[in-house]
Image (cartoon, rainbow, N blue to C red):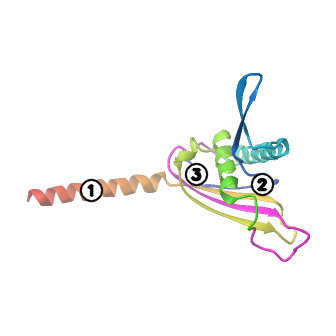
Amino acid sequence: MADNVTFSVVGVPAPQGSKSAFVRGGRAVIVDGSSKTGREKHAQWRDDVCRAARIAKSEMFTGPVSVTITFWLQLPASDPHRWRHITTPDLDKLIRSVLDSLVNAGMIKDDSLVYRVNAAKWYARDGHWTGATIEIEDMSGLEESDRAESRAAAKASRASLKG
């Protein structure tokens, strides 16, 4: 069982865009996103997340986990009074990018193990850095106790039916 972990990633959060397919030299090619600049920003963000995760991790999470992510994005100079980030990039695409990065970093065995995500986008105000704070909570122990409790209740129910 891995310990819970919280760490920060300083960088520019970039979404994991949709895949684009095209033919090059008679072969089908699939790439992330439609622009080279977008792919480069995404690759840099994924590298930033992987690097921070590798520094923070103790062992790989192999059971159910809950993930909390707070994204801090650049505050626009045109409106310095904003707090909540409600424009692009989309929150779901930012989450997908982080979860895939955590798998690539060896922090989570597979992103299907994430059963709950709590995420928010804020503007980086008053000197706050851009990036994300990520918390991963190991739920393996709770899952095991819930399963044991469920088995015991089922067994007691069968016993009461027998009479």
The disc at residue 3 is 3
Q: Is residue 51 magenta?
A: no
Q: Callout 3, which amino acid?
A: Asp
The mark nearer the N terminus, 1 or 2, is 2
Q: Main secondary structure of the magenta part?
A: loop
Q: Position of residue 48 (x, y in %)?
A: 78, 47
> Hey, which quadrant is residue 25 in on the image?
top right
> Hey, which quadrant is residue 68 in on the image?
bottom right
Q: Position of residue 150 (x, y in %)?
A: 31, 57
* Residue drawn at 82 percent across, 54 percent down: 12
The outermost residue toward the right is 77
* Residue drawn at 83 percent across, 41 percent down: 36
Task: Give the Cα distance between marks 3 and 1.
Answer: 28 Å
* Residue drawn at 73 percent across, 68 percent down: 86
Q: For marks 3 and 2, give the one nearer the viewer.
A: 2
> Where does label 2 land, which residue?
13
Q: Is residue 87 above or below residue 143?
A: below
Question: Which stretch did the figure color magenta?
Answer: 58-85
> Where does label 1 land, which residue?
152
* Residue drawn at 85 percent across, 45 percent down: 37
